[in-house]
Amino acid sequence: MTIPEIEWLSQARKGDNDAFTNLVEAYQTPVYNLCYRMLGEAGEAEDAAQESFWRAHQSLSKYDPQRPFVTWLLSIAAHYCIDQLRRRRLDTLSMDLLPEEAIPDSGTPTPEASFNQTEEQRHLRALLGTLGPQDRAAIIMRYWYDLSDEEIGQALSLSVSAVKSRLHRARRELARLWLAQQPQALTSERRQNEAPTL
Amino acid sequence: MKHLPYEGWLLSEEELTVEEERTLRMHLDSCAACSRLATALQAVEQEFTTIPLVAPAPGFGQRWQAALVEKTREAQIKRQRSLTWMFFALSALGALTIFVVLNLQFFSNLPTPVEFVTQAVYQMSLAISVGKSVLNLASVIREVLPLSIPLVVWIDITTAFCILCFVWIFAIWRLPISKRSTTK
């Protein structure tokens, strides 16, 4: 955390909304990215990120300054997204049934690069979509935010051994899916390269 | 072929000893399944670590500020509603307490449950008969008074009574807000 951020946090805890807005500006990308990776849809991710910041704003007095602020924010966002995914599962709506959404732009202007990125994002979404909400959150926190087992446990209200076991299970599932997708990818690639049978 | 403990080693992030690493490498050379798993894991991890963080659409801060204003207002309305309901609940509880306290003297000196029940039934029938008498009295007044008081005056009285009721309800509803804004 930088010195201005510490100052904003201190002012925000005293009720300064402008200082909290500065914190929102500073942490919007990590929070939004977590929501996007969890929910897989830009509109829902935006709503989830806004709601996470609102919840953080409301419970700022409960924040423990000994804990990294970003981990605390990510914990709020992850819990909200897990709830959303569980609700979505109750509504029997799978991620595969969701309409293909435009992937938010992350600064790649050329059409080719943008296409490749979109494909990558889709593939990534498919991979993450196979995991359960908590496993997904654990994997995202590990690979995108480089959080330790202890930090993930703290953020998701899990024990360290539970985090280890979830990560272990999630990696196996991801590898299994990746292997399952490979023959399809190879087949489609082969088909593209085949000569037309006229 | 046995994949244990090699699969576990591949999937966990624990540091392996030099001996374990050597054994794993030897196993990967001879086991196609574990080798495929290792390749898949590597590919997945590479994909995850190379893709950058996704940023929200521009103007997230402004949207947050607008949402903050809206949500603060909603929270205030919610708080105000719950305060109003609490006030009504407390009023009802107070009225009930007064009713119980006033009626307790009738039941305080009763030694047996039978007498208690008898007294309760008596009190209820008394309350019903009093209610009936009040209704009778009201119907008598309704029949007698219109002869002396014109219809317009009746309408005025009823309207004034309704307005007073509205003012009372509105005052209860608005009071918490004005108090809060003054304290702020």
Image (cartoon, coloured by chain):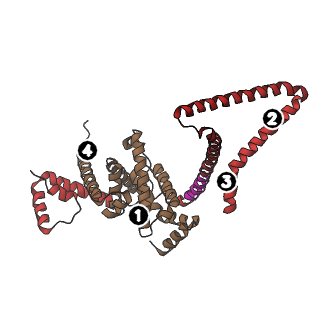
Chain colours: A brown, B red
Q: Answer left or right for B5 relative to A174.
A: left
Q: Is residue B92 above or below residue B6?
A: above
- Label 3: which residue? B176
Number of other residues with Cα within 10 Å of mark 4, as a class: few under 14, some 14 to 19, many 20 or more? few
Label 1 sits on a secondary structure element that is: helix
Q: Nearer the viewer, residue A159 or A75?
A: A159
**Mark nearer the N terminus (2 vs 3):** 2
Q: Is residue B46 above or below residue B173?
A: below
Q: Nearer the viewer, residue B69 or A144?
A: B69
Residue B52: percent from left, percent from top: 38, 61
| Secondary structure predominantly adopted by residues drawn in magenta | helix
Label 4 and label 1: CA atoms lie apart by 38 Å
The mark closer to the camera, 1 or 2, is: 2
Label 2 and label 4: CA atoms lie apart by 81 Å
Viewer can see residue B111: yes
* Pointers 3 and 1 within a single chain: no
Residue beneath the point at 37% across and 42% down: A96
Q: Nearer the viewer, residue B150 or A81?
A: B150
